[in-house]
């Protein structure tokens, strides 16, 4: 087995194409094809089902791809360590986060400590964040409440309340709070089914016997806020996820307390990597 063969296989598996793999590795497409075929011939296996010229992984290929993800994550870790050793001079930290503005305080604190480190931030819900962590596509995740996973190291960073929001011209706009039961049969705009905010809200409404009239499901907190501001209905959202907007009014619930936790997460096996550890240490100091 040669490193170049494994590298070529991994590139094809990751991109789904021999041509794109060749472009990413800056070698010719015939070279990639030959290296993958030599690897298959050496072990008498088939790594790709090449029907219709598509590079679809075989069962063996899928298992090997899971291994090479870990392998090339370690290669990347080694490169980052060597570049950053001493003064953290040239590292790259990839963060996946729910509602990226959630983490500006963390990024600011980290940048103050390590101004030369490049930071990339991708956005998504908690499920997307977990997926990127497990695929080695991000180094650190910031997510809301989630199911326990033995592959992850997580810790609670903070907790915030779920609040209702209405447009500034809504009849309730002059109020400071509402009772949960007042939402019975009210027109509402909510996050998608399965989101942590919606799950906590629905658990509370079911317990209280409240049935709101949900007319929109939107897979974006920003879009929920925009729909509420345009008068489409009442929304609920995590208080920390609510930047100031003069078009909206925040209403706290006076009779029930719904909370959402915000977590920092990484793979257990990566907890002590140089930049991951640095990020966790800095955020210990970030309120």
Image: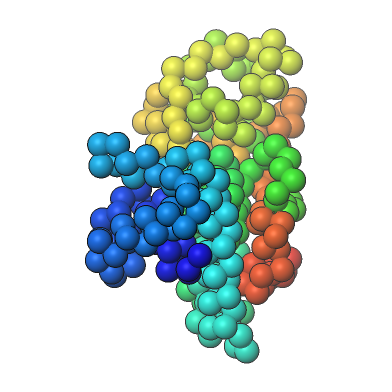
Give the quadrant of residue 54.
top left
Front residue of 194 and 274: 274
Tell me the residue at 74%/46% (across/down): 150
Q: Is residue 81 left or right of residue 179?
A: left
Q: Is residue 217 left or right of residue 261?
A: left
Q: Give the percent coordinates (x, y) of residue 138.
A: 53, 58
Q: Is residue 155 left or right of residue 17?
A: right
Q: Quadrant of the C terminus?
A: bottom right
Q: Is residue 25 left or right of residue 74?
A: left
Front residue of 244 and 96: 96
Front residue of 36 and 44: 44
Q: Is residue 228 above or below residue 136?
A: above
Tell me the residue at 24%/66% (across/down): 28
Q: Is residue 72 above or below residue 267?
A: below
Q: Give the percent coordinates (x, y) of residue 77.
A: 58, 71
Q: Is residue 103 visible?
A: no
Tell me the residue at 29%/65% (across/down): 31
């Amino acid at each position: 087995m040669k490193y170049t063969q494994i590298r070529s296989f991994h590139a094809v598996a990751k991109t789904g194409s021999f041509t794109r793999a060749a472009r990413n590795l800056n070698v010719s497409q015939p070279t990639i094809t030959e290296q993958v075929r030599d690897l298959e011939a050496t072990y008498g296996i088939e790594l790709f089902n090449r029907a219709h010229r598509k590079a679809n992984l075989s069962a063996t290929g899928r298992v090997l791809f899971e291994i090479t993800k870990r392998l090339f994550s370690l290669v990347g870790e080694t490169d980052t360590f060597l570049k950053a050793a001493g003064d953290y001079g040239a590292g790259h930290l990839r963060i996946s986060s729910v509602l990226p503005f959630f983490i500006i305080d963390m990024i600011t604190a980290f940048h103050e400590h390590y101004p030369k480190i490049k930071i990339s931030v991708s956005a998504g819900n908690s499920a997307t964040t977990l997926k990127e962590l497990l695929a080695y596509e991000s180094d650190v995740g910031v997510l809301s409440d989630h199911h326990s996973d033995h592959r992850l190291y997580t810790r609670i960073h903070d907790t915030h309340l779920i609040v209702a929001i209405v447009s500034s011209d809504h009849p309730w706009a002059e109020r400071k709070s509402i009772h949960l039961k007042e939402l019975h049969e009210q027109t509402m705009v909510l996050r998608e089914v399965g989101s942590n905010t919606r799950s906590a809200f629905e658990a509370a409404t079911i317990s209280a016997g409240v049935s709101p009239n949900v007319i929109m499901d939107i897979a974006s907190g920003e879009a929920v806020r925009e729909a509420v501001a345009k008068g489409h209905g009442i929304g609920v959202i995590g208080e920390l996820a609510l930047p100031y907007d003069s078009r909206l009014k925040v209403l706290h619930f006076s009779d029930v307390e719904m909370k959402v936790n915000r977590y920092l997460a990484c793979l257990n096996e990566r907890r002590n990597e140089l930049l991951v550890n640095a990020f966790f240490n800095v955020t210990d100091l970030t309120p």
